[in-house]
Image: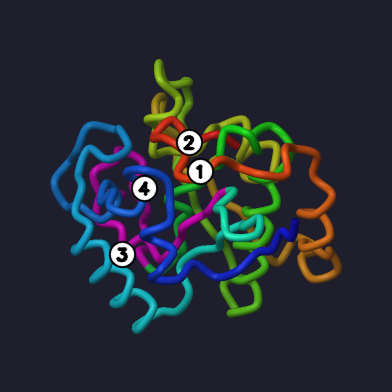
Amino acid sequence: MTRRLRALTLADLERLPTGCGSCAFWESEKRLERRCASASDAEGMREWYLRVTGEWGDCGRVAYEDDEVLGFIKYAPSGYFPQAATFAARPLDQSVPLLACLHIAPEARHRGLGSVLLRAALRDLAGRGERRVEAFAAAHKAAVLDESPVLGLEFLLRNGFTVSRPDPEYPLLKLDVRSLALFTENLESVLESLKFPLRVPKRAPASWMNGR
């Protein structure tokens, strides 16, 4: 069994858990219910991916075990995520990268994989000269956590984020990626060392979503 990290590819969109590859929540302009897959458009997401990677570059990282997805993180400047502008604490600078999605397979949750994926994203952004990254946080846990498209507040604070624009429901957090020692850590070795079942069942159901 081999685990690895790699950039999110177009082919990966079809291999993500049910609903994730076609979820167009962040890419929609109209204000939506704050729920994963409240907008779905598989072809639109393919076009979005091609546009972002063509204009800006890699927009995510995926953790694999052999040919099975363990988890993924997606990010891009907030201008590529129109839904961000519908939040009260919306970003003021649309050129700053925004962490939009971070989902972990159920069998791999609560073992540190979310932090590994976050580190992989931050390393990529720092290597491309980005100075900071932002993310919305859910101040209150959702009734059904698996349906939340917003990262957890505790998770972000635990990983060094601070509040940039307060809001009682969805504050905007920020992190200076230059303040972290990102290049000395062997993330592949960390991924291999995580203790969770070595095999994730094929095509896990929609409840795959949003574990850290």
Q: Earlier in the sequence, mark 3 or mark 2?
A: 3
Say which element carries label 1.
strand
Nearest to viewer (mark 1 / mark 3): 1
Q: Which residue is mark 2?
A: 208
Could you tell me if the residues under marks 4 and 3 are in contact, i.e. CB atoms within 8 Å? no
Say which element carries label 2.
helix
Residue 103 image label: 1
Amino acid carrying label 2: it is: Trp
Residue 163 in the image, given as x and y percentages of width and height: 55, 40
Residue 86 shown in magenta: yes
Q: Earlier in the sequence, mark 1 or mark 3?
A: 3
Quarter of the N terminus within the rendering? bottom right
Residue 200 in the image, given as x and y percentages of width and height: 60, 42
Q: Earlier in the sequence, mark 4 or mark 2?
A: 4
Could you tell me if the residues under marks 4 and 2 are in contact, i.e. CB atoms within 8 Å? yes
Q: Which residue is mark 3?
A: 80
Segment colored magenta: 71-94
Residue situated furthest left in the rendering:
30
Quarter of the C terminus within the rendering? top right
